[in-house]
Image: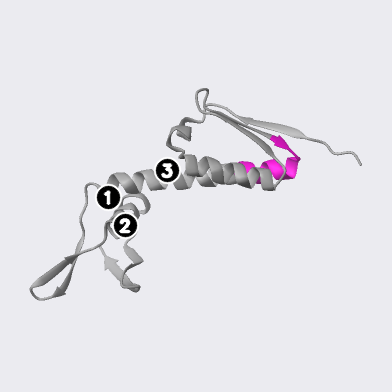
Amino acid sequence: MNTCTQTKCRENEENLNIWTQQLVLIFYKYCLDHHIWPTIDFEQRKMILLGKKESIDDADKYFLELTTQALKQTHLNNILRTIVWEYQLDSSTWQSYSYKCNAEIEYACSIKHLLKVCTSCIRSKTISLFF
């Protein structure tokens, strides 16, 4: 049985600097489970995949998904430090949303420019915010 391997190289990956050890382990596990040999070089900012074409294409998409998630998380973490949203419990009591919920609200407002944001933030209830 003949098999053909292919190599795919992504160079100048500026966003590798936000990858955590956990993301690297997740990506390597995914690749190895799909019979792909990955190499990530953080100094040269490149990623190399060696394996079957179909598997490489899937791994490349997964790499981009993980990078997108890391970018979003970095953005949310930055927002967490600066914004505090509150909601009114009754006529005289205000309660702060959780830091995670604050970040999600700000992310939706600043990145997605949503007019209505629905998110599960407080005691597993869906809260609707209108701007």
Determine which residue is flagged by label 2.
100
| Residue 54 image point, x, y percent | 73, 45
Q: Residues within 10 Å of mark 1 (few under 14, many from 20)?
A: some
Secondary structure beneath label 1: helix
Q: Tell me residue 105's x, y (percent).
A: 30, 58
Q: Secondary structure at mark 2?
A: helix
Farthest residue to the right: give it.
1
Q: Secondary structure at mark 3?
A: helix
Q: Which mark is residue 34?
A: none
Q: Which residue is at a point 89% across and 38% down the rendered structure image?
A: 2
Q: Which residue is mark 1?
A: 80
Label 3 sits on residue: 71
Quarter holding the C terminus is bottom left
Location of residue 41 in the rendering, given as x and y in whole percent from the top left corner? 55, 27
For label 2, count other residues whose C-alpha is less than 10 Å away and answer few (under 14), some (14-19) or many (20+): few
Q: Which residues are magenta?
A: 50-61
Q: Are marks 1 and 2 in contact (CB under 8 Å)?
A: yes
Q: Residue furthest top?
A: 44
**Marks 1 and 3, how far apart in space?**
14 Å
Q: Say how the picture is coloured.
A: one colour
Distance between the Cα atoms at labels 1 and 2? 7 Å
Q: Is residue 94 left or right of residue 19?
A: left
Q: Earlier in the sequence, mark 2 or mark 3?
A: 3
